[in-house]
Amino acid sequence: MVGEMMLKKLLLPMIYVAEWVLFFYVLLCVFVFNMIIFSNIIYTDMSWEEPITLTSSFIKSSLIIVGMGLVCSFYIRYLTGNKAYKRFKEVICGILFGLNSLSCVICLSVVYGFDLSNDDGILLLIVTLVSISLTMQIIMKYNYEMNSKLSG
């Protein structure tokens, strides 16, 4: 019994630190991705200017994006902690992925005009779909929790 209590006291802070490390890693990736896209909008205004490419390997980058989306999906599904902490993390992740979805759709329409003839446009579409699916997962989880609270 004492061993379980010690394990819980040691493991719980490590889980919270790992959650925040994951969140800040995803936040950094989303921020850098959006800054590259928005810099392409701002700085590439003449036909002879070359935009910043998002990746050198399309397959590797798309697998990383889908993998990060799966990790975030499992994280959202199995979010632990008390109710206030879970709600705070859901709201923060929902805002992050919702804003990323919105910015990706804007960039997709402005930069590429929904013409997905190159790898960067397809990669931007993949990021948009992953962000939208994560946002919808958070919204559906919140609605499910609210409906179960009201009915029971």
Image (cartoon, rainbow, N blue to C red):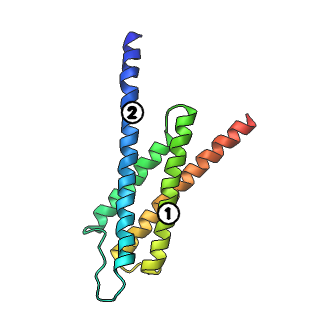
In the image, taking residue 147 as reference, residue 29 lies left or right, namely left
Disc marking residue 101: 1
**The image quarter in which residue 63 lies:** bottom left
Which quarter shows the C terminus? top right
Q: Residue at x 39, y 71 (%)?
A: 38
Q: Residue at x 39, y 76 (%)?
A: 41
- CB-based contact (under 8 Å), mark 2 and mark 1: no
Q: Residue at x 28, y 68 (%)?
A: 55
Between marks 2 and 1, how big is the CA–CA gap? 28 Å
> Which residue is outermost to the bottom?
47
State the residue position of label 2: 15
Q: What amino acid type should be assigned to the residue bearing mark 1?
A: Ser
Please tell me whether residue 95 is drawn above or below residue 45 in the rendered image.
above
In the image, taking residue 57 as reference, residue 105 lies left or right, namely right
Which quarter shows the N terminus? top left
> Which residue is outermost to the front?
42
Q: Is residue 7 visible?
A: yes
- Dot 2: few (<14), some (14–19), or many (≥20) neighbours within 10 Å? few
Please tell me whether residue 90 is drawn above or below residue 14 in the rendered image.
below
Locate residue 100, reporting x and y percent.
Answer: 47, 61
Which badge, 2 or 1, is on the more N-terminal residue?
Answer: 2
Locate residue 97, reporting x and y percent.
Answer: 49, 56
Q: Residue at x 39, y 74 (%)?
A: 121
Q: What amino acid type should be assigned to the residue bearing mark 2?
A: Ile
In the image, taking residue 136 as reference, residue 75 lies left or right, namely left
Element marked by disc 1: helix
Locate residue 133, reporting x and y percent.
Answer: 51, 57
Please tell me whether residue 125 is drawn above or below residue 86 in the rendered image.
below
Locate residue 65, reporting x and y percent.
Answer: 37, 58
